[in-house]
Structures are given as C-alpha cells and as structure tokens.
Image: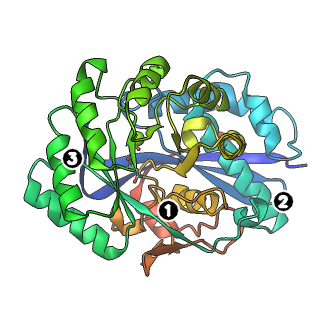
Amino acid sequence: MIQIRKIEQLQLKLPLTSPFETSYGILTEKAFDLLIIEDELGNQGVGELVSFQQADYIEETIDMSRLIIKNELIPLLTMSPIKEPFEVQRRLTKVQGNFMAKAALETAIWDLYARRKNVSFREIFKSTKTELAVGISLGIHTDSAKLLKQARMYVSQGYTRLKLKIKPDYDIEPLTLLRKEFPHLLLMADANSAYTLKDLPVLLKLDRLNLAMIEQPFNQRDFIEHAYLQKQLKTPICLDENIRTLNDVKTAHTLGSCRGINLKIPRVGGIAEALSIVTFCREHNLTVWLGGMFESGVGRCLNIQFASQNDFTFPGDISASDRYYYDDIIKNKACLTDGKLAVPLGKGNGAVLDQEKIERYCYKKELLFS
Ligand code: OSB
Ligand code: MG
C-alpha cells in the first residue's frame, strides 16, 4: 500500500531553443509544473503537468489544471492508501475532463510505484525495444529557404519522419517543396484544427502528396466531419485534439473518422487510459503513435518508455532533448545516436532529475499536501 506523505508542486519555465509557430500562435518558452509525490518510505515519483497557458490547443489551461489538482484531485488521491497505480484512474473518474491535470498526478504515482518496486516502466510495459526511431514536428516557417534548411538539418540528424504544421494558405506550397526535397520520406501535416469542410478542395490537393497522415484538420469535436473527409481521402487522417478517452477512439473508429491516433498520455488522463487505447488500436487496426507536448526531460523519459512498447511502429513526436531545450532539467538527456533514441535504463520513468537546473528554472514552489 502506498501512503502518500507529501505532494509538492514546482512551477517552471524553460526557454525554447527557437520560437515554435503553429496555427494557433508562437511559443518561445514552455511553462510546466513538476509534481513530486513522496510515500511513507521516502520514495519519490515525479509527473509533468504539460497544459498550455492558453486554451487554444484544447480547453484545459495550466491555471485550470493547477486549480483542479489542488481542489479536486489531491483530496481523492490522498483519501486512503493506494494499492496499485490503476486504482488512481478509477478514483479520479469522479472528476470530469481535466485530463492533463489527472495525468500529472497519475504518472507521478506510476513513477513512485515503479521506483518503490525497483522496476522500470519498460519492464512493466513488457517492452523489448531498447532504442526508437523518431520523428520531428516542424513549426510554420513562411520563409521557404529557412523551412528547407531546418528540414534538411533534422533529416541529416537522423529523424525518420517529418511532420509540418500547416494552416490555411500555408499548406500545399511548403508540403510540395518538402515532398520534392524528400521524395521517399515519411512526411505528414498537422493542422491543429485550423480547417473546416469549406476547405475540402485544398485538402483534396494535399491528398496527392503521398503524405503518411493528415493530423487533426478539423475542430476537436468534429467526428462526423472527419469521417466525411476520410471517405474522400486516400491519405489516412490521424486525430489528436479529438481524442481524450478510449471512448473517443471507439467513436472515431465506428464512424470512420480516422485511421490513426496521435496518442499523448497527458491528453488522455494518464498511463492507464493510454494503455487501453493502445490495446484497442491493435485490435482494430488503427495506427497508434506517440505525440508530444514540448515535454521537459521528465515527460520525454515517460514518452520514450511508453513508446518502447512493441505496438508502436510509426515514429513518434519524440525528439532529442536539444531539439527544444538547451538546458533541460534532467541529467540523462536524450540524444540521437544513428538516428535513434535510447530507452532510459533507470527505474520508473527513468528520468534523473538535475536539481541545479530545476532550481534555476523554478519560479514557484508549493506544498500541496503533507
Ligand atoms: O499538435 O501535436 C501537436 C506540440 C504542442 C501541442 C500540440 C502539438 C505539438 C507538436 C509538437 O506537434 C510535439 C513535440 O515535438 O513535442
Ligand atoms: Mg497535433
């Protein structure tokens, strides 16, 4: 039985190596929290809260997550001892939505549980892979010379799949350019909900570019519109913002809204839900791959461990630490070697926290439970 003795919240801001532009804006630094949970034996687990400061990607913002964590989730979590981590998911279902808030705590408990048992996540997930081929997510670059330069650099570093952020009037041209430059590369586009059915002619043109997938063209509740579009495209649609639960995956599959799922552990409320989505995708022939949220080293280690499961064959949005951060907060930074990322060997999520870096970038600490 895990008895929670202490929950601490560290609020950090890490500068990005370069600004990242999407259809909803430009990001220059990433705000996130670390939730550190301690048990009665002094073991610790850490989870990352990844929600954004604005409600543009999905509705949950980091301020909302913090409020829900403090007022609703921690009372449920600390009410009585916890037997095993799947219990956390069941306890937290009383609270509607707020998946990123739930995931921050749930993944911290998984980490604590694994470290306490002296096992790594990859052992728990029965992964056999020790290294992963990964893809890069490229922001909007309206200067095509800069776009090509960036793309060539990442491909030469060994990224095996390239995803370009698109928006209306920034789509066919840059994607055609990339397709010409890399005729055989796994190339895809992510629209972050920026299109509507009125844009059908453009989307039909994208269908000729031999893209691996088109990610989230329409709004986050548009299951029916995505199904209508998928019927007219040979390119698989992949859903991101639409998918918060296993039930959303079932809805998408039943309606034919997509053929692939960008799975982000935080967007679906944690590891337990993510595992059930992986199983459903395997059984129903949906391509599932691991997405990213500009995670710091903590979330990145979790993502790498999760994506080391044999069900993941399509390269995820999992990059080396230096793709976004020159000063990441873990000691065992992720590096590309021969185009692959090594799966961390340590216990739990495998992250080795760099306390000095954490102190440097942490601007607020709060003891949420003791
Ligand atoms: O839509 O997949 C997305 C980052 C933040 C929010 C949404 C998305 C993304 C990315 C980058 O595409 C993923 C990453 O490399 O971390
Ligand atoms: Mg996306």
| Residue that numbered label 2 is attached to | 41
Foreground residue among 75 and 94: 94
Note whether residue 21 is visible: yes
How far is the residue under mark 2 from the one under mark 3? 48 Å
Q: Residues within 10 Å of mark 2 (few under 14, many from 20)?
A: few
Q: Is residue 164 above or below residue 369?
A: below
Q: Which mark is residue 140?
A: 3
Q: Say whether disc 1 or disc 3 marks the residue closer to the N-terminus.
A: 3
Q: Tell me the kind of residue under disc 3.
A: Ile
Which of the two residues, 241 or 311, is positioned nearer the viewer here? 311
Q: Identify the secondary structure beneath mark 3.
A: loop
Can you see residue 28? no
State which quadrant residue 201 falls in. Answer: top left
Residue ID at (70%, 40%): 280
Answer left or right for 23 relative to 290. Answer: left
Q: Position of residue 33 (x, y in %)?
A: 50, 46
**Between marks 1 and 3, how big is the CA–CA gap?**
24 Å
